[in-house]
Amino acid sequence: MTTITLDQATQVVDAGLRHARELGLNPLTFAVLDAGGHMVVLKREDTSGILRPDIAYGKAWGALGMGHGSRSLAQRAEKAPAFFTALASVSQGRMIPVPGGVLIRNAAGAVLGAVGVSGDMPDNDEACAVYGIESARLVADPGLAH
């Protein structure tokens, strides 16, 4: 199985957090999962809320589990709310279909894992995830274009 390494995941998070500080965003939490859905890196900035790790994990887990960035999942949830209610049940509440969950791909398009970011507005969370992924020379897949 092709998967993200600890070094790559650390690069993603550190670059994303630097970008958030440059933008003056609220404190963020990053969760990076490998291709099998296992946590590789979790970083929570000082004063980031106590629910933020669970939200970041849920954004990444949902993207990885459904094979689409959470922006796509949010748009799909609006069109098929009953299906996403069922997904919430089957995933035991682990899935958060809100922008900020981004698939991490290699240059060949294989999924290496996913990153979830929580703490600011969803668009800002997603922007920091994408920035971090691209800074690590990987390919960000947030879902449908915005």
Image (spheres, rainbow, N blue to C red):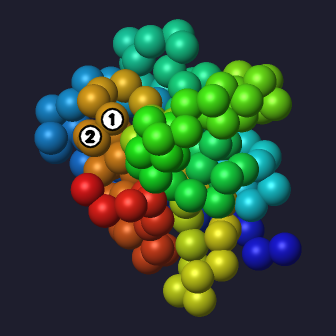
Q: Quadrant of residue 100?
A: top left
What separation in Å lies between label 2 and label 1 (alpha carbons)?
5 Å
Which label was assigned to residue 29? Answer: none
In-front residue for pair 143/81:
81
Q: Residue furthest bottom?
A: 108
Judge from the rendering whether residue 92 lies leftward or rightward of residue 60; answer left or right: right
Residue at x 60%, y 50% (from the top left corner):
63
Where is 6 relative to 21, above or below?
below
In which quadrant will I find the N terminus? bottom right
Horizontal and vertical percent position of residue 105? 57, 72
Three-letter code for the amino acid on which mark 2 is drawn: Asn
Which label was assigned to residue 122? Answer: 1
In-front residue for pair 146/127:
146
Residue at x 66%, y 36% (from the top left corner):
83
Horizontal and vertical percent position of residue 60? 59, 44
Can residue 113 be seen from the camera position used here?
Answer: yes
Horizontal and vertical percent position of residue 74? 45, 40
In which quadrant will I find the C terminus? bottom left
Where is 97 relative to 7, above or below?
above
Judge from the rendering whether residue 116 lies leftward or rightward of residue 54; answer left or right: left
Residue at x 81%, y 56% (from the top left corner):
36
Horizontal and vertical percent position of residue 26? 26, 24
Within 10 Å of disc 2 (Cα), the crowding (few <14, some 14-19, many 20+) is: many
- What residue does disc 2 label? 124
| Tag 2–tag 1 contact (CB < 8 Å) | yes
The secondary structure type at the circle numbered 2 is helix
Residue at x 58%, y 82% (from the top left corner):
109
In-front residue for pair 15/54:
54
Q: Residue furthest left?
A: 23
Three-letter code for the amino acid on which mark 1 is drawn: Pro
